[in-house]
Image (cartoon, helix red, strand yellow):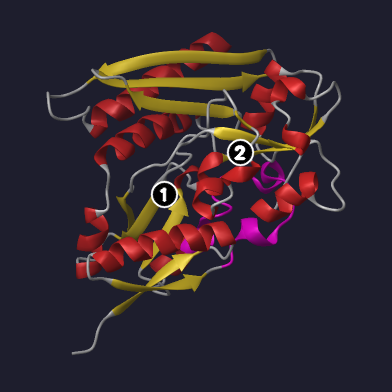
């Protein structure tokens, strides 16, 4: 009997194919065989800053188009790169277990943020990170940074290094087995959804593949990212906006803290929602409402 091999759409970077490979392996453990199909996205081809490209969806649009066109059967995204609005015909069938969403500093000579001298050049492609770094160290020279993980690290450790440090997501380094380059875990609020993956399928499909994908969903991770992404949705912001958010369980419910960078500085707000029962977290609707409430608090403070 022939084995059905499903096509898993992914970006072509080492991080993207590693992440997608983890999903393919997890599906393989459930008896579903996948092969990776690389799709080039606007964010991979265009070297402009994320803000210049519009930010939202530059790493996802072509993957989603390939999925809708039937060129692949599922797609794996870094959830922080996905626009909040869900396109017709597609559904996020699984948010697997999230890894540590922290931002980390990768600096020359093992330096921590406090060790960097005034005027030190720190690279990041994220306005969110730039705003929070500037709040903590206004004396730093924040430089725009693009490229894959190795390209970014080479700006600090390569033969033509021109930066004193870069800020990256710990999750990507963990998945690539590169945590040895981390010199400090930073106290910054991450991008909504950072550290989480999204496995997207076509809404109309009801196959052994979609059933297996749903089995990878981790309810606590989904609840957290639903709350965080609701902040973005309410603010009308995208993945390049200076917005950070982190939802964590605190023993009695879900607590969400979010930050908004403005011309006057950072605004931070926190709220929580209780669990819906003794053996479950808040329902998705309550998690989304929590994100909306925190976003409204941010907007009120920014007026």
| Magenta highlight range | 40-63
The numbered dot on residue 189 is: none
Q: Relative to residue 167, is residue 268 drawn left or right?
A: left
Q: Residues within 10 Å of mark 2 (few under 14, many from 20)?
A: many
Residue 249 in the image: x percent, y percent? 31, 24
For the question of whether residue 55 can be seen, the reply is: no
Residue positioned 68% across, 24% down in the render:
133
Name which of mark 1 and mark 2 comes first in the sequence. 1
Taking the view exactly as shown, the residue that stands out farthest to the bottom is 1
> For residue 221, which quarter of the picture?
top left
For the question of whether residue 179 can be seen, the reply is: yes
Front-most of 9 and 291?
Answer: 9
Residue 286 in the image: x percent, y percent? 25, 26
Front-most of 236 and 120?
Answer: 120
Residue positioned 57% across, 34% down in the render:
103
Q: Relative to residue 203, is residue 82 drawn left or right?
A: right
Residue positioned 68% across, 62% down in the render:
45
The numbered dot on residue 197 is: 1
> For residue 25, which quarter of the picture?
bottom left
Residue positioned 66% across, 14% down in the render:
265
Q: Relative to residue 223, is residue 197 drawn left or right?
A: right
Dot 2 corresponds to which residue? 240
Q: Secondary structure at mark 1?
A: strand
Residue 234 in the image: x percent, y percent? 44, 28
Q: Say if 88 sits above or below 165 in the image.
A: below
Q: Nearer the viewer, mark 1 or mark 2?
A: 1
Q: Residues within 10 Å of mark 1 (few under 14, many from 20)?
A: many
Front-most of 254 and 102?
Answer: 102
């Amino acid at each position: 009997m022939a084995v059905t091999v499903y096509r898993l759409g992914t970006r072509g970077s080492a991080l993207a194919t590693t992440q997608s490979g983890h999903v393919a392996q997890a599906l393989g453990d459930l008896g579903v065989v996948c092969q990776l199909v690389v799709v080039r996205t606007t964010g991979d081809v265009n070297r402009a800053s994320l803000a210049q490209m519009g930010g939202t969806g530059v790493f996802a649009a072509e993957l989603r188009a390939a999925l809708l066109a039937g060129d692949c059967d599922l797609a794996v995204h870094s959830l922080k790169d996905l626009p909040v609005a869900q396109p017709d015909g597609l559904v996020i069938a699984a948010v697997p277990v999230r890894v540590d969403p922290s931002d980390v500093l990768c600096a020359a000579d093992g330096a921590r943020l406090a060790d960097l001298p005034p005027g030190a050049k720190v690279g990041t492609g994220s306005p969110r990170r730039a705003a929070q770094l500037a709040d903590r160290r206004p004396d730093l020279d924040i430089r725009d940074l693009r490229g894959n993980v190795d390209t970014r690290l080479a700006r600090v450790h390569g033969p033509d290094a021109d930066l004193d440090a870069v800020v990256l997501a710990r999750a990507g380094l963990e998945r690539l087995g590169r945590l040895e380059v981390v010199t400090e875990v930073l106290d910054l609020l991450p991008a909504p959804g950072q550290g989480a993956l999204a496995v997207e399928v076509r809404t109309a499909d009801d196959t052994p593949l979609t059933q297996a994908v749903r089995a990878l969903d981790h309810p606590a991770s989904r609840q957290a990212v639903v709350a965080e992404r609701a902040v973005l949705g309410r603010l009308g912001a995208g993945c390049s906006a200076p917005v950070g958010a982190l939802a964590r369980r605190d023993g009695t419910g879900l607590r969400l803290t979010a930050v908004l960078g403005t011309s006057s500085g950072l605004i931070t707000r926190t709220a929580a929602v209780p669990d819906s029962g003794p053996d479950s977290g808040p329902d998705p609707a309550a998690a989304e409402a929590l994100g909306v409430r925190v976003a409204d608090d941010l907007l009120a403070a920014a007026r």
